[in-house]
Amino acid sequence: MLAPELVELAEAYGIATEFWDWRHVHRPVSERTVVAVLAALGVDASTPDAVRAALADRRLTEQRRPLPPVVVCRQGTGAHVRVPAGDGADLEVRFEDGTVLRDLALDEHGCVLPRDLPLGWHTIVLTLDGREVTTPLAVTPDFLGVPGHARHLRGPGSSPERYWGLMTQLYSVRSARSWGIGDLADLGELVRWSAGYGADLAIVNPLHATTPVPPLEPSPYFPATRRFPSPLYLRVEDVPEYASLDAADRARVDELAAPLRRADTDPGTIDRDACWLAKRAALEVLFRAGTSDARRAAYDAFVEREGGPLTDFATWNALAEEHGARWRDWPAKLCDPRSPAVDAERRRLAERVEFHRWLQWLLDEQLGAVQHTARDAGMALGVVHDLAVGVSPEGADAWAMQDVLALGVTVGAPPDAFNQRGQDWRQPPWHPVRLAEAGYAPYRDMVRALLRHAGGVRVDHVIGLFRLWWIPAGGSAFDGAYVRYDHEAMVGILALEAHRAGAVVVGEDLGTVEPSARAYLAERGILGTSVLWFEHDHDAGGGPLPPQRWRELCLATVTTHDLPPTAGYLTGAHVELRERLGLLTRPVEEVRAADRAEREAWLAALRAAGLLEDGDADDEDVIAALHAYVARTPSRLMGVALSDAVGDRRTQNQPGTVDEYPNWRVPLTDGQGRPVLVEDVVRSPRADRLLRLVAASVRGAHAS
């Protein structure tokens, strides 16, 4: 039993001292965990006296603060702002367009802001006792939803409100011109091709950057940064400076590409290290060759726009090239990004810092080009990027943003039905207090950068905007506690930046998610995620959920990247793989039988719906029928895995493994395991059939 004062202190910092587990069993959090989580927040709770002192300090801080660190409100709500009482106090709002709202009424409780404030980032200004105090004000959309972009009409039945498109793990989708790994030019080709069928979006894996030195982290969900993309995805020949190379330099670049292009015929695994070493060497050739005055001016404007965070990221890259990718192993004086030693190294390594800033400029250009391609081809949304839940504790963000991250803990998930040992994702969480004190600027800028050239964002583990499972250093996933975030602020800022970008937001809300969180996200117009294999009718014995009862505000798909492609799933490949890797917690025959029964139930549902004929059907027919079933749902967005379009069977990621399976290193192949390049995709009769069916089914479902 925790002491009442410790419980009060924990609650003051958003730490839950109890929770209900996946079996609906009440679980108290241990005193050791509560004290450790408070320590990660910078609060000493090691003794009863320390707890009392921390409580007193918390109350005093709140009393002395003239304004909250940030105010985030919904448009139309008239948020309350607490300000200290006193004669002569004056409050005004300075809008981001330069206009000012003066003479706001104050009483002993503070001020209620007008309901009709414009969306955007503004500033509240309090004048008290002759001094001015300011705080950021974010006015966010009450409801986001799916943008109603104008687009080219595509014949009878086309709808501007219901969109579908491809989902792809971009690194796996190679072409004859890419360098052993899928790149942004390959994405542009897929976008152009799928738009011809009426697709309005293309969802890609996180493109976040990893380390600049091998070994490169293969998981797109364990990046070095979430703000800046990976140069691995650059198409070297599309950099304008390539066209200006002299014969010798161009021959050198082409020589670097040749062995990687030969590797595109290998169905084995993607070698990120080889791809990056060759691509980096080629990009260094282009960098040394110089650029035109006009392009130099554009680069300078980009650097000015991105400011300090870009320089921090480039500096981390330059230091990592000298000292290794793990910044905690660097000389102590370099572990503080604001230290004089780092400033001196930045000057000494100025050319490498400039190189890494230049790479980000190239990425900004090529990402912009892909989105322009999508919109020019008639897509309503275009590219939908993926936002990972966190970053590596040894990466650029953890180094540069130590002031707003909690580095004494990692995030994960408590034990549940699928991971009975729990999960530790090894990623440091946002520090909720310090993030708020920073006006949420690091979070806002990350989201803004991701949406700069996008029509949407998928947020991995969207429940992390409400709470995260914090695991103290040295503990296991059993030893964690939930820490709350201000979800009004986290979701509101996400919606505001998406609104300004004309983008949609999809939250990955699979697994154990509180119904209240799903309801709140729907209320704010944040779409959920529905995967066919997980959609059960619990009111009718747990069989397949009829399509008309699926959620409207969601991205509906047949599969997801944590499952095998559908051709593999239909064979029970996921069960055999987990059995081979020792991941099953029940007898394999029992799991096989349950899996077989589930698949048979879905085949029966397809036949009952008239989407599949009686008797045996090959995987291509079943995959087509499953997608036609999803197309009958009212979901606003529908995703079609590129792997399903070509009949791939191999899993991209097997949860619960690291090196036991080649996660995130599997290139696109067909049903026989032969490599499938982009050139093969656009000529594939199988892909042509599926995309035509989906396009017609979505139109038909809407028309009916």
Image: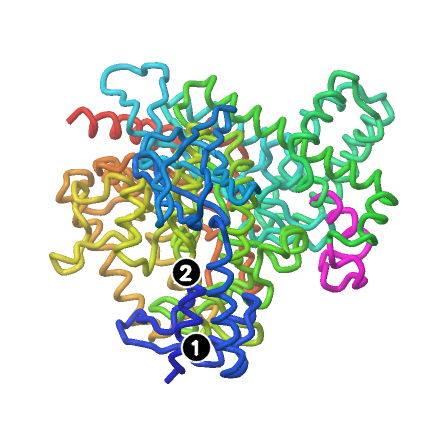
Query: Can the viewer see residue 144?
Result: no
The magenta segment is 313-336
Q: Amino acid at mark 2?
A: Arg
In the picture, the disc for residue 484 is 2
Q: Is residue 41 above or below residue 503?
A: below
Mark 2 → mark 1, Cα distance in angstroms: 17 Å
Judging by the rendered image, the residue that carries numbered circle 1 is 6
- Where residue 435 appears, as percent x and y from the top left, is 53, 52
Taking the image as shown, residue 33 lies to the left or right of residue 516, namely right
- Tags 2 and 1 touching, CB below 8 Å: no
Of callouts 2 and 1, which one flags the residue occurring earlier in the amino acid sequence? 1
Residue 481: percent from the left, percent from the top?
A: 43, 70
The residue at the point 23 percent across, 47 percent down is 616
Residue nearer the viewer, 487 or 510: 487
The quarter of the picture where the N terminus appears is bottom left
Q: Residue 649: x and y, percent?
A: 43, 49
